[in-house]
Image: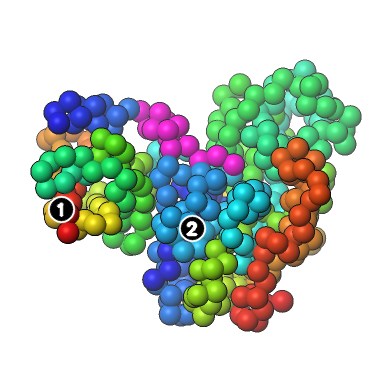
Amino acid sequence: MLRYGQALSAQKSIYSLPVALAAREGLFRREGIDLRVVIPVPGGADRMIHALHDDTVDVTHVAMPFLVRAALAGSDAVAIAAEFNDPIYSLVARPEIARIADLKGRIVGMADPGGSIAFSMRKLLALHGLRESDLRVRTIDGTPARLSCLRGGGCDAVPLGQPQDLLAQAEGYRLLGTSNQAVPEYLYTVTAARRSWAAANSELVVRYVRALAASFGMMREPSRRAAVVAAIVDITAVPAGIAERVLDLYAQPGRKALPSRGEIDPQGVAQVIAFMAEAGQIQPPLPAAERFVDLSYLARAGVR
Amino acid sequence: MRSIRIALLAIALLPAPVLAGANRDRGQDEVGPGPDEGPSYFGLVLDGAGKPVDDARVTATSRDGLAMVTRSNAAGAYNFPGFNRRINADEVKISCAKPGYRQLRVVRRPAPGGKPVRAVETECRLQKS
């Protein structure tokens, strides 16, 4: 049995798609893995690395900044495969707001100020001559809660991930810009394991990585599109048409949200470290990206 | 013990967003409890003499293998948010464990009749091994 940790939030978000699809389609079973998804309660990204250390889980889904922070605090956890790269966050506004510059003095529902969403949105605003102080910012965690704020009239604009950004546009709200216009590509979520545990269970880890790689392959396989759409509908509870558009968005040329086979680009890790440094979360000298990853399992699974 | 039960029941009947706040996920793009969420789970971990057992690992497992794991507090109390509404609450198993103990029995308390189940109470007994 392999205990895979996942925050309750991630379990219901698009970011669970790679592992959820692999589980639904029997890709773990094919590798001889009885994968069990375990949700630590109370949850939260900070808790996921802790769950590796108190033996609640064997491997875990985690956003890269939390892995970096835990490793700098002494954890031997490392990323063994990428789950999501370079997320797409859309700045979506009330229909009458035509441009980002028009947000001056308006209420914008923003994500956690220390996170990559708020960071990328600040960069996007700056491209259009706005600073956060030009706005009336409300901190609202979670894409669904921010969409509710927009729909309820409490916010004039909000950053939204998929599929809610597409849902909002279908309802008539206006897309002003995306995070990718303002920040370089970075590694978002990964599967992490303790180095010590992974070394002692290396064959199992390689088989896990192989199943994950097959899941990414399935997402790109036109003949399996219906299965992938069904998985997105199941996870995020959106209509199938919106799920189709999510896949179309990820398939656009130049988009790299979905890894090809779970590969980790150390440059994407370095970018996370740079974001954290710019946000004052870590101080120079900055650590090397290689400290937070172990590419050997990907290599043994045939992923380059 | 009765006062602990009453306090637990009060917690269990709090609106879902309040519980979600207590178990709040931060740092990723979280999703709060929605209309698709089933009943929550709560209860006590007790030893053979009926005394609370703290820091026991409590697991709620659905029939398809999805599990939530938490730890009991000093009063022996635990609580979980709901699984997806599609998961039948009758098929969710509660178990508890702690080094030096073995699980004695698990007793699910019947829900009040005639009302939709918003929270499921289950007592888990451990015995020193």
Q: Residue at x 34, y 42 (%)?
A: B80
**Protein chain holding label 1:** B
SS at mark 1? Answer: strand
Q: CA distance from mark 1 to mark 2?
A: 27 Å
- Give left or right: position of A198 versus B57: right
Image quarter in which the C terminus of chain B is found: bottom left
Q: From which residue to which does the magenta span run?
A: B15-27
- Please check the rendered image and state whether residue B75 is part of the magenta-colored stretch, yes or no: no
Is label 1 or label 2 in front? Answer: 1
What number is the disc on residue A26? none
Left or right, residue B58 beside residue A193: left
Q: What residue is disc 1 on?
A: B127
Q: Position of residue B71 (x, y in %)?
A: 34, 46
Residue A291, by quadrant, is: bottom right
Residue B112 visible in image:
yes
- Chain at tag 2: A
Q: Quadrant of residue A127?
A: top right
Label 2 crowd bin: few (<14), some (14–19), many (20+), radius 10 Å: many
Instruction: Judge left or right: residue A83 versus residue B108.
Output: right
